[in-house]
Amino acid sequence: MRYSPLLAELIQALQCLPGVGAKSAQRMAFHLLERDREGGQRLAGSLAGALARIGHCRLCRNFTEQELCPVCASEQRDEAQLCVVETPADVAAIEQSTHYGGRYFVLMGRLSPLDGIGPGELGLDLLDQRLASGTVQELILATNPTLEGEATSHYIGELAGRYEVRVMRLAQGVPLGGELEYLDSGTLAHAFSQRREL
């Protein structure tokens, strides 16, 4: 079906969101135009404001409107602990699910040479400076358990090896409440190889 130019542009623009295809974008556009023009105006204003004013924390690279994000600005956070994550969503997940009291470093991705993402794109020079400062005593690698995430973790572990920093990797394997018979072989093999004494 052919749409008016503005409607076609709106549907196309909504498809930039992850998981939103042509049908979902069409449904969103029609909803905003038919039932919630005020919500659409609020969405447009919030999006424009966020894109104009949200940048990266100069220490951890997380999203913030200030020079330092709230975590880096807090004197209650432990500077000796640094958790390396791939995305700001990972920071939010850790903050919501744990009592972690240290600081973060957000890579904004993971090593992927085929996609042109190397150490420079992940800000690893900035991470190297933080490790060289001597304040970090424990580095927690919390990258995803994918091939790229593991490679990124290994690279950062090697980088941290130049300093007297304890390097830890998040435990991976059997989920709480999970049953062994339903786990994939890779997860089970990894969990078995990473077993620890009780």
Image (cartoon, helix red, strand yellow):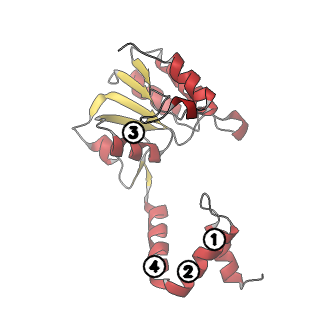
- Cα separation, mark 4 vs mark 3, equals 35 Å
Q: Earlier in the sequence, mark 1 or mark 2?
A: 1
Q: Quadrant of the N terminus?
A: bottom right
Residue found 47% across the figure and 26% down from its top: 128
State which tag comes first along the sequence, 1 or 4.
Answer: 1
Residue placed under numbered mark 2 in the picture: 31
Q: Amino acid at mark 1?
A: Ala
Mark 4 closeness class: few <14, some 14–19, many ≥20 residues within 10 Å = few
Residue at image mark 3: 59
Residue tagged 1: 25
Task: Find the distance from the CA under tag 3 to the CA under tag 2.
Answer: 41 Å
Q: Earlier in the sequence, mark 4 or mark 2?
A: 2
The secondary structure type at the circle numbered 4 is helix
Residue 45: percent from the left, percent from the top? Answer: 45, 74
Q: Position of residue 18 (x, y in %)?
A: 60, 57
In primary-sequence order, the first of circles 3 and 1 is: 1
Q: CA distance from mark 1 to mark 4?
A: 16 Å
* Element assignment for label 3: loop
Image depth: mark 4 or mark 2 in front = 2
Between the C-alphas of marks 1 and 2, the distance is: 10 Å
Image marks 4 and 3: residues in contact by CB distance under 8 Å: no
Numbered disc in front, either 3 or 1 = 1
User: Which mark, residue 39?
Assistant: 4
Q: Is residue 175 above or below residue 45?
A: above
Residue at the extreme left: 76
Q: Residue 139, percent across and down?
A: 40, 25
Disc 2 packing (10 Å; few <14; some 14–19; many ≥20)? few
- Looking at the rendered structure, the secondary structure element under dot 2 is helix
Kindly identify the residue that appears in the image at 63 percent across and 71 percent down. Answer: 25
How far apart, in angstroms, are the residues tagged by discs 4 and 2? 10 Å
